[in-house]
Amino acid sequence: MKGTAQRGLKQGLLTTWTLGKVIFPITLIVTILQFTPVLPWVIKQLTPLMGVFGLSGEAAVPLVLGNALNLYAGIAAIVSFEFTVKEVFIMAIMLSFSHNLFIESAVASRVGVSWWLISGIRIGLAIFAAIVVNLVWDGGFEQAVYGFISSSDTNLNGWGEIVLHGLQTAAIAIIQLALIVIPLMIVMQFLREMGWLTKLSKGFAPFTKALGMKENTSMTMVAGLTIGLAYGAGVMIQAVKEDGVEKKDMMLALIFLVSCHAVVEDTLVFIPLGIPVWPLLIIRLVTAIALTMTIAYFWNKLDKNKGKEPTTNEHSYNTF
């Protein structure tokens, strides 16, 4: 038992180091950019595009902050303005698909899939969903009521305080990462060595099989669905190394998870904004399932036409 915990701790520290090398600098840079003319300039350039999604110009602020930082930054920006229920719902669905873009996509790319592919899928889904909702939904023109949420402003004086704030934010992000990843890796080590991981994989196998993946991809799926793309990447990296997850299966798993990850948390955070959250959850799940099954179908058909047998235990991935 002690040896298993030590091996899990070691793996957790290694994974934290691997992901931390991505998360720390990106968090630091983006946090500092908030206090420069860069983000306001980006927002100004995006404002004319908001009308395509049925949004007012101010919606560029939460969308940029949500994509550059995280859902909470986007929500904090939403409550700083007066939006209709429809506008808030459209922003919620966009941010559900595409948020924390730099960190989550960069961390997920550590598995071996191109950052541009992951980001492109997320942004494409956000744009497509927003346009569809705007065209289909005729209601939601009443003003949104934000409940007890309130925004908080950070007033900093001088570059010294701004850089210090950025370092603190980045450090907190790494600490949060370690607090989640290290216990998770220890638990995963116990599950793996006691054989429970195999049983769990078999129980989840019908779902992964329906999506066109093998059963050894199931833990990757469970981790991404429950704890999110960034933290779930630790399990993905470990699965690539130890569970023999193939390149194709990892690709399909990532396609599903970039569409739908941390489904409970990422849905519940929007409840105080006064929007219907069940449609939000259903749209994400249906989109992820349909997209993954479609890509798996054509991928399998292409492999069959080429007469190509899938390659097993492919641990070295090339980016797309």
Image (cartoon, rainbow, N blue to C red):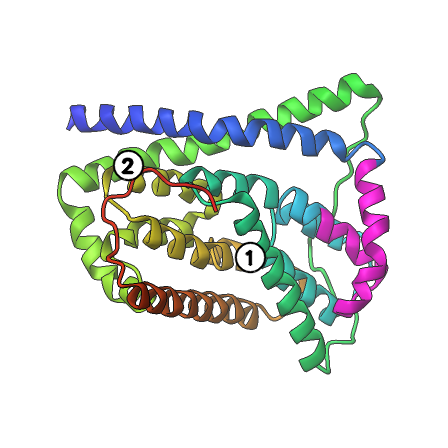
- At label 1, the amino acid type is Ile
Residue at the farthest top position: 160
25 relative to 245 in the view: left or right: right
At x 67%, y 43%, the residue is 68
* Residue picked out by circle 1: 121
Report which quarter residue 10 is drawn in.
top left
Residue 98's disc is: none
| Front-lying residue, 80 or 112 | 112
Q: Is residue 275 visible?
A: no
Instruction: Return the residue nearer the eye: 316 or 23.
Output: 316
Give the SS element for disc 1. helix
2 and 1 marks in contact (CB < 8 Å)? no
Q: Can I make out residue 203 in this image?
A: yes
Residue 256 at what x, y percent from top left? Answer: 43, 59
Amino acid under label 2? Lys
Q: Which residues are magenta?
A: 38-64
The numbered mark, 2 or 1, whose residue comes first in the sequence reads 1
- The image position of residue 59, as x and y in percent, is 78, 58
Q: Is residue 147 above or below residue 289?
A: above
Q: Secondary structure at mark 2?
A: helix
CA gap between label 2 and label 1 equals: 25 Å
The picture places residue 148, in percent across and down from the top left corner, at 69, 55
> Is 45 or 86 nearer to us in this picture?
45
Pointer 2: what residue?
A: 241
